[in-house]
Image (cartoon, rainbow, N blue to C red):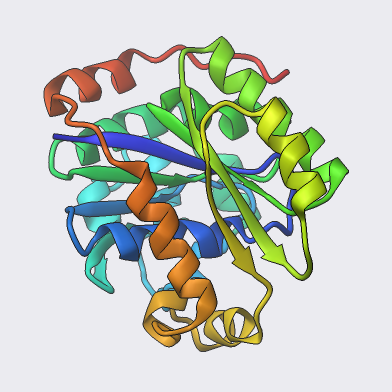
């Protein structure tokens, strides 16, 4: 089986990378999980996962004649993690269409793929993870602008045949009932969880560890486990999914 999820937000600062790794660790308690930093322009998953010093990253896979994706795949925290580098020159040298083949290769040997998506929808490389995914998790902060940006993600996903797995409110500091009701009326899929703002999230990032490794008993970690439990990954055929990835058409940004 395999199902690919894009974790997306439409804006920066929502805690998307923290959410991707937290969902990955929670799902890894039951499934074989692979996490990919598909934010090839503004990557930071490698810092969250303690992989800042690795030699081979996704950038090395995406260049012509590049490394096989297996060489950029690392076993960390009960998951396989594919980090991306932070070099601007490496980003410019990468052929981002090669992401299709890299993801297809990974799909053949995992149950759940989580694609940490770029914060904006401003380029073909930015929208590709949303198009490749079977379903999209939309990460929101409880503000009207954040909901507006998230709706752009949903519109794009649905227009290219990707479903919405649900929404995840992150960095919540107070009652959000009014905002939540508005979001419920706009978004496909359920509210997966409400994750509270927490100092331990920042501490985990500074320590180079995913939240569920650094503070497994925190309220934020419990919320992410709740969200992961509601995802219910589907039993897709690995070969069919891989072929769909390789044949995916890269659309123009909205």
Q: Is residue 102 above or below residue 88?
A: above
Residue at image point 23% right, 23% down: 241
Q: Nearer the viewer, residue 160 or 177?
A: 177
Horizontal and vertical percent for residue 205? Answer: 56, 79
Q: Quadrant of residue 29?
A: bottom left
Q: Quadrant of residue 13?
A: bottom right
Horizontal and vertical percent for residue 225? Answer: 39, 63
Count of numbered labels shown in the rendering: 0
Quarter of the image containing the N terminus?
top left
Q: Is residue 167 above or below residue 81?
A: above
Q: Nearer the viewer, residue 158 or 39?
A: 158
Residue at image point 46% right, 12% down: 249
Quarter of the image containing the C terminus?
top right
Residue at image point 51% right, 88% down: 207
Horizontal and vertical percent for residue 116? Answer: 49, 49
Q: Nearer the viewer, residue 11 or 118?
A: 11
User: Is residue 34 toward the left or the right of residue 160 in the image?
Assistant: left
Horizontal and vertical percent for residue 85? Answer: 50, 59
User: Is residue 213 toward the left or the right of residue 186 in the image?
Assistant: left
Q: Is residue 82 above or below residue 62?
A: below
Residue at image point 26% right, 47% down: 69
Residue 98 appears in the rendering: no
Residue 87 appears in the rendering: yes
């Amino acid at each position: 089986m395999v199902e690919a999820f894009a974790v997306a937000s439409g804006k920066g600062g929502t805690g998307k990378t923290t959410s991707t790794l937290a969902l990955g660790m929670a799902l890894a308690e039951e499934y074989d999980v692979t996490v990919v930093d598909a934010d090839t322009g503004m990557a930071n998953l490698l810092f969250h996962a303690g992989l800042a010093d690795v030699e081979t990253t996704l950038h090395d896979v995406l260049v012509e004649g590049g490394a096989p994706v297996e060489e950029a795949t690392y076993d960390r925290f009960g998951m396989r993690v594919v980090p991306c580098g932070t070099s601007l020159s490496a980003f410019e040298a990468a052929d981002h269409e090669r992401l299709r083949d890299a993801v297809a290769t990974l799909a053949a040997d995992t149950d759940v793929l989580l694609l940490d998506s770029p914060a904006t929808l401003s380029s073909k490389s930015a929208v590709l993870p949303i198009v490749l995914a079977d379903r999209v998790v939309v990460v929101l902060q409880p503000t009207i602008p954040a909901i507006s940006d998230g709706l752009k993600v949903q519109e794009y996903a649905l227009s290219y045949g990707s479903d919405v797995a649900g929404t995840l409110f992150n960095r919540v500091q107070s009652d959000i009932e009014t905002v939540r009701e508005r979001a419920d009326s706009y978004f496909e899929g359920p509210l997966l969880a409400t994750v509270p703002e927490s100092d331990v999230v920042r501490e985990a990032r500074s320590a180079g560890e995913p939240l569920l490794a650094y503070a497994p008993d925190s309220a934020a970690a419990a919320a992410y486990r709740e969200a992961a439990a509601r995802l219910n990954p589907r039993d897709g055929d690995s070969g069919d999914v891989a072929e769909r990835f390789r044949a995916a058409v890269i659309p123009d940004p909205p």
